[in-house]
Amino acid sequence: MEIPSSNQLTPSHDEIAARAYLVWERNGRCHGFALDHWLEAETQLMKELAENVSEVLVPEVAAPPCRARLAGSRYGLVLNPNIQGSLVTA
C-alpha cells in the first residue's frame, strides 16, 4: 500500500482553476464571483482528495459473521445473533 505524498494531499493550481471554471459555468457564468468559485472548487477538490486518502490509509474491512451466543456469560451479556456485533444485557 502506497502512502500518498504531501503533494497528493493538496490540489494543484491548475486543478483548482479547471474546477473553478466548471463552477463558474454551472453558476451561469456570472462575473464578479471569481474568489467564491475558486474557494468552492478548492473545497470540492480537497474533500475528494481526503476521501481518496482515507480509502488508501483506512481500508474497509468486513467483520467476520458471528453466530455464537454467549448466553450465561459471567458478565451477563448475550450476543444477539440477529444483529452482528450487538450486545444485549441478560
Image: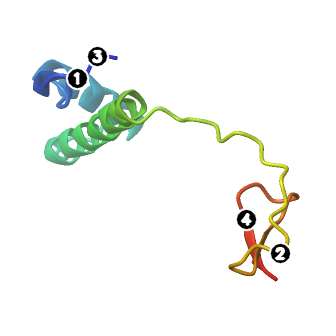
Q: Pointer 1: residues within 10 angstroms few (<14), some, or many (20+)? A: few
Residue 82 in the image: x percent, y percent?
A: 88, 58
Disc sitting over residue 86 in the figure: 4
Q: Is residue 14 left or right of residue 25?
A: left
Dots 2, 1 in contact, CB < 8 A: no
Say the numbered circle drawn on residue 2: 3
Crowdedness of circle 3 by 10 Å Cα count: few (<14), some, many (20+)? few
Q: Which residue is mark 1?
A: 4
Q: Does the residue at mark 1 contact the one at mark 3 (Cβ under 8 Å)? A: yes
Q: Is residue 78 above or below residue 26?
A: below
- Sooner in the amino-acid sequence: mark 2 or mark 4: 2
- Among the two numbered marks 2 and 3 on one chain, the one whose residue lies closer to the N terminus: 3
User: Alpha-carbon distance for marks 2 and 3?
Assistant: 46 Å
For marks 3 and 4 on the same chain, the one whose residue lies earlier in the sequence: 3
CB-based contact (under 8 Å), mark 3 and mark 4? no
Q: CA distance from mark 3 to mark 4?
A: 34 Å
User: In which quarter of the view is residue 58 placed?
Assistant: top left
Foreground mark, 2 or 3?
2
Circle 2 residue = 72
66 is higher (above) or lower (below) than 23: below
- In this view, the residue in front, 19 or 66, is 66
Q: Mark 1 or mark 2, which is nearer the start of the sequence?
A: 1
State the quadrant of the N terminus: top left
Q: How far is mark 1 from mark 3, CA to CA? A: 6 Å
Closer to the camera: disc 1 or disc 4? 4
Residue 85 falls left or right of residue 10: right
Measure how far apart labels 2 and 4 are at the Cα level.
Answer: 16 Å
Q: Amino acid at mark 2?
A: Gly
| Residue 32 x %, y % | 16, 46
The answer to whether residue 85 is left or right of residue 18 is right
Q: What amino acid is at disc 1?
A: Pro
Which corner quadrant of the image does residue 21 belong to? top left
